Image (cartoon, rainbow, N blue to C red):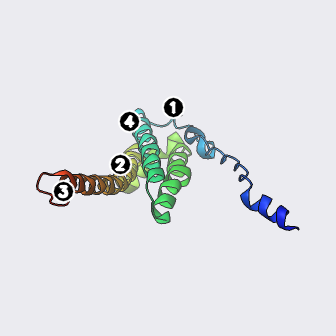
């Protein structure tokens, strides 16, 4: 390769990257229909809240430099844990759901909702941690502006 070819290659505009493949639709992840009539209505509302919170946290993570561990945890919740939880509930034959109550003292729907609440609590904790970073950055910037542009600054 000649000198001009090397220079041309060095200063050539980079080729645009192919857009990433869209994530699987959360409503149908792993073939799960979260609106399945076998899922109790209160659980469906909680699932909707979880999916919305996961989307919100995803946007927050895209803005910040987030540890891979947190990002992986959110992706696992969305793509693995939530669908598997709901599928395992749906797969229990209705005639055998009473066995869960006899064994645990709690209905299957109660355990499902309790598990969804636990998951939502963890998502909320991650969101609070991300928001705290934003709050700290804002406070720091506001303090800088106050110091920089206050009347008492002799270096202005």
Q: Residues within 10 Å of mark 4 (few under 14, many from 20)?
A: few
Q: Quadrant of the N terminus?
A: bottom right
Q: Nearer the viewer, residue 155 or 65?
A: 155
**What secondary structure is found at the residue carrying circle 2?**
helix
Between label 1 and label 2, give the one nearer the viewer.
Answer: 2
Q: Nearer the viewer, residue 38 or 134?
A: 134
List x then y, in percent, for residue 61. Answer: 45, 53
What residue sits right under mark 3 in the picture? Answer: 147
Using the image, determine if residue 101 lies above or below residue 6. above
Name the residue: 34% across, 51% down. 124
Between label 2 and label 4, give the one nearer the viewer.
Answer: 2
Q: Residues within 10 Å of mark 3 (few under 14, many from 20)?
A: few
Residue 27 — which label?
none
Q: Residues within 10 Å of mark 2 (few under 14, many from 20)?
A: some
What residue sits right under mark 1 in the picture? Answer: 37
Q: Looking at the rendering, which quadrant does residue 70 occupy?
A: bottom left
What residue sits right under mark 2 in the picture? Answer: 117
Q: Are marks 3 and 1 in contact (CB under 8 Å)?
A: no
Query: Horizontally, is 9 left or right of 112 in the view?
Result: right
Between label 4 and label 3, give the one nearer the viewer.
Answer: 3
Q: CA distance from mark 4 to mark 3?
A: 51 Å
Residue most extreme to the left: 152
**What secondary structure is found at the residue carrying circle 3?**
helix
List x then y, in percent, for residue 137. Answer: 30, 56
**What secondary structure is found at the residue carrying circle 4?**
helix
Residue most extreme to the right: 1
Looking at the image, is mark 2 or mark 4 earlier in the sequence?
A: 4
Q: Quadrant of the C terminus?
A: bottom left
Between label 3 and label 2, give the one nearer the viewer.
Answer: 3
Looking at the image, is mark 3 or mark 1 earlier in the sequence?
A: 1
What residue sits right under mark 4 in the picture? Answer: 42
């Amino acid at each position: 390769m000649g000198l001009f070819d090397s220079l041309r290659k060095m200063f050539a505009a980079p080729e645009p990257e192919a857009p990433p493949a869209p994530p699987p639709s959360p409503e149908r992840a792993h073939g799960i229909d979260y609106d399945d009539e076998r899922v109790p209505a209160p659980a469906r509302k909680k699932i909707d809240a979880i999916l919305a919170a996961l989307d919100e946290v995803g946007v927050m993570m895209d803005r910040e430099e987030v540890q891979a561990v947190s990002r992986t945890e959110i992706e696992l919740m969305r793509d693995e844990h939530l669908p598997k939880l709901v599928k395992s509930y749906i797969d229990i034959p209705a005639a055998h759901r009473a066995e869960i109550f006899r064994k645990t003292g709690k209905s299957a729907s109660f355990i499902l909702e309790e598990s969804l609440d636990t998951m939502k609590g963890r998502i909320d904790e991650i969101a609070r941690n991300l928001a705290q970073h934003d709050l700290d950055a804002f406070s720091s910037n506001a303090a800088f502006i106050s110091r920089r542009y206050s009347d008492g600054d002799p270096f202005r």
